[in-house]
Amino acid sequence: MTTTVRKQAATGALLGLALGDALGFPTEFNDVPSILAKCGPWREMELPRPAIVTDDTQMTLALGRGLRTAMDRGSLAPKRLERPVREEFVDWLHSPDNNRAPGNTCLTACHLLGDDTRRWQDASQIHSKGCGANMRVAPIGLAPGLSDEQRSGAAQLQSALTHGHPTALAASDLTAHAVRLLAQGADPTGLVGLLRSYALDHRTHYDHTWLGDLWTRSQDPSPEHFIARGWDECLAVLERLQRAARTVSPETDPCLATGDGWIAEEALATGLLCFLLFPDEPLTALRRAACTKGDSDSIACLTGAFAGAWLGPDAWPAEWADRIEYHGELVALGALWDR
């Protein structure tokens, strides 16, 4: 695997994430027969007009802005990241554009984060492993100049601000790592194996520097027990993904193999499965992800992030990319990191 980031991986990933989000927005909460009746054959699905995104892209941009601010202030560290990201999340909560059916976990946690006297660990929803944390984590995998420890810690911290369940932490870490590997040019055929090795290496490592005493809000007897629960659930779904990538027909709803994506580990696995079914056909991968019975916008936004990190912005036709909501901000953030 090369260590050189592929040209414009950040721009490609951020545009792909938003395109998947917009493509999957109208199909969320629908089963596949209903989607086909509404949209026609899944391989011919078109980007809606206007191409409106959901809270998935909004929160990705909030995290990206917070991360940019933190890195502008010096070497990335927990407090340096927490403050601006916390502020961005609270700003998102109160934004008039926050009207895209956001998840209850994010709403509850961001409301609590708005109290400056409250430690973030006390705002974290410790029992939630919804996909709201790893759907937005791609910027952590795309930002240049981070060490492995910084990237892992930042991915878990941004999750823990809202979703404190250990599986949400592990899935966010794995999602950022997958985006990074693809941006560096890792062969998609070996990606699941690399992710399983990463999960095994991190299985009992609780990062006190980045997470503090978060684990004490759980019922676990130790921090190692707490974090291992999350990695074990991710390892189990990665095994399902490895089988599915070899055996699943592209014509079958991927959710049947790796889950509906409402929870973190399933969103990661099903988003990756759609990408791995069509690694060199990014629009087909997005369409497959959007035509699923599960959390289609989150699944498709993850698929788009993986495909865009792997292929760069040329993966996306200009006729689609140019009219995606927040296009200017997505491109500006991507260009900053691609430089």
Image (cartoon, grey):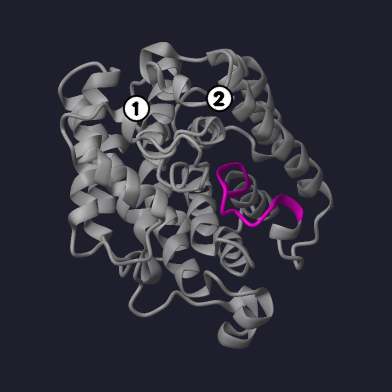
Residue 181: percent from left, percent from top? 53, 31
Give the quadrant of residue 212. Answer: top left
**Residue visible at 39% across and 69% down?**
320
**Residue visible at 15% across and 22% down?**
73
Q: 111 left or right of 236?
A: left
**Residue visible at 37% across and 42% down?**
10
Say if mark 2 contacts mark 1, CB within 8 Å: no
Which residue lies under the disc numbered 1? Answer: 121
Which residue lies under the disc numbered 2? Answer: 219
Give the quadrant of residue 158. Answer: top left
Q: For this rendering, which residue is in front, 296 or 283?
A: 296
Residue 207: percent from left, percent from top? 45, 14
Indicate the secondary structure of the residue bearing disc 1.
Answer: helix
The 10 Å Cα crowd at callout 2, few under 14, some 14 to 19, many 20 or more, is: few
Residue 210: percent from left, percent from top? 37, 18
Q: 142 left or right of 36?
A: left
Q: For this rendering, which residue is in front, 292 or 72?
A: 292
Label 2 and label 1: CA atoms lie apart by 15 Å
The magenta segment: 257-267
Q: Is residue 205 visible?
A: no
The 10 Å Cα crowd at callout 1, few under 14, some 14 to 19, many 20 or more, is: many
